[in-house]
């Protein structure tokens, strides 16, 4: 079983780590499959335009460079960590209404896709590229943040279109999705280091995108809650150092 996280943001949108930093962060923790899924926002809507002004989204002009960066880092990830790095995006349709907002993960994408089309048009474009279409955080994430309920509101119609539905956001498991009978996947929605503590997926596959795709579609996976031992050991070191109690203690080297 391969430890995977298929929802990760970098500095290309609103993440705190660069793609090389993400590779080292996940690789040093033994992950075998990750996907970079930076936001690709609408160009025609008010909130979409705001994301472009704030540089919180991929653009048509930098998309080729984004894919090139991932490709270059994928070679390093495999060479140094035996880790598969998959290119992706989070097609982001935000509205002032949570019930009109929707985020769609495209995993294994090879070309630019506009986020301004309808949900079914976007999914069709994803499938044309042979990529996975995943409904991102379709119910309440139990966090103070913009929520995206549109996909869940339309789940009866959209259930046959998506390959999987996210069943968790960070440490919070979505009981509605878990009990729905829909195909599921668990990922971090990673933006910074603390987000690594989250539900993840263990995929029964090998280190190729086609095998990952087959595992997701056929639900050859398990869910697992990931506690970051490297982070915990680091915090313990800091705590002991501040208390003056570290004398005589021996700690494993951090990755």
Image (cartoon, rainbow, N blue to C red):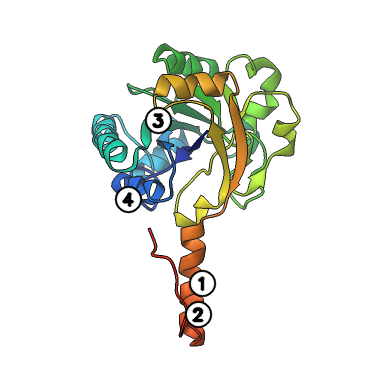
Say which label, 4 or 3, has the lower sequence index.
4
Q: Dot 1 surroundings within 10 Å: few (below 14), some, or many (20 or more)?
A: some
Q: Dot 2 surroundings within 10 Å: few (below 14), some, or many (20 or more)?
A: few
Q: Position of residue 215 (x, y in %)?
A: 53, 22
Q: Nearer the viewer, residue 52 or 14?
A: 14
Residue highlighted by disc 3: 88
Residue highlighted by disc 4: 21
Say which label, 4 or 2, has the lower sequence index.
4
Q: In the structure shown, which secondary structural element does the residue marked by tag 1 occupy?
A: helix
How far apart in space, not on screen, are marks 2 and 1 (Cα)?
6 Å
How far apart in space, not on screen, are marks 1 and 4 (Cα)?
23 Å
At x 48%, y 61%, the residue is 231
At x 74%, y 38%, the residue is 175
How far apart in space, not on screen, are marks 3 and 1 (Cα)?
35 Å
How far apart in space, not on screen, are marks 4 and 2 (Cα)?
27 Å
Q: Position of residue 101 (x, y in %)?
A: 58, 33
Contact? badges 4 and 2 (CB < 8 Å): no
Of badges 3 and 1, the one in the foreground is: 1
Residue highlighted by disc 2: 240
Residue highlighted by disc 1: 236
At x 58%, y 18%, the residue is 218
């Amino acid at each position: 079983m391969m430890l995977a996280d298929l929802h990760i943001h970098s500095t290309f949108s609103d993440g705190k780590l660069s793609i090389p930093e993400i590779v080292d962060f996940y690789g040093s923790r033994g992950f075998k499959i990750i996907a970079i899924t930076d936001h690709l926002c609408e160009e025609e809507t008010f909130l979409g335009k705001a994301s472009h002004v704030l540089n919180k989204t991929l653009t048509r002009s930098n998309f080729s460079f984004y894919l090139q960066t991932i490709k270059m880092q994928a070679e390093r990830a495999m060479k140094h960590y035996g880790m598969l790095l998959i290119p992706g995006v989070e097609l982001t349709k935000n509205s002032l209404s949570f019930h009109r907002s929707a985020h769609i993960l495209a995993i294994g994408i090879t070309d630019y896709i506009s986020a301004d089309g309808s949900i079914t048009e976007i999914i069709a474009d994803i499938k044309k590229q042979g990529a996975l279409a995943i409904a991102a955080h379709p119910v309440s994430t139990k966090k103070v943040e913009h929520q995206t309920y549109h996909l869940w509101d339309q789940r009866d119609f959209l259930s046959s279109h998506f390959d999987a539905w996210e069943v968790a956001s960070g440490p919070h498991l979505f009981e509605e999705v878990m009990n729905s009978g829909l195909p599921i996947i668990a990922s971090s929605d990673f933006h910074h280091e603390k987000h690594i503590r989250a539900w993840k997926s263990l995929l029964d596959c090998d280190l190729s995108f086609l095998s990952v795709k087959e595992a997701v579609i056929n639900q050859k996976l398990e869910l697992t809650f990931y506690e970051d031992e490297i982070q915990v050991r680091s915090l313990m070191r800091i705590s002991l150092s501040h208390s003056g109690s570290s004398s005589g203690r021996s700690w494993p080297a951090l990755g």
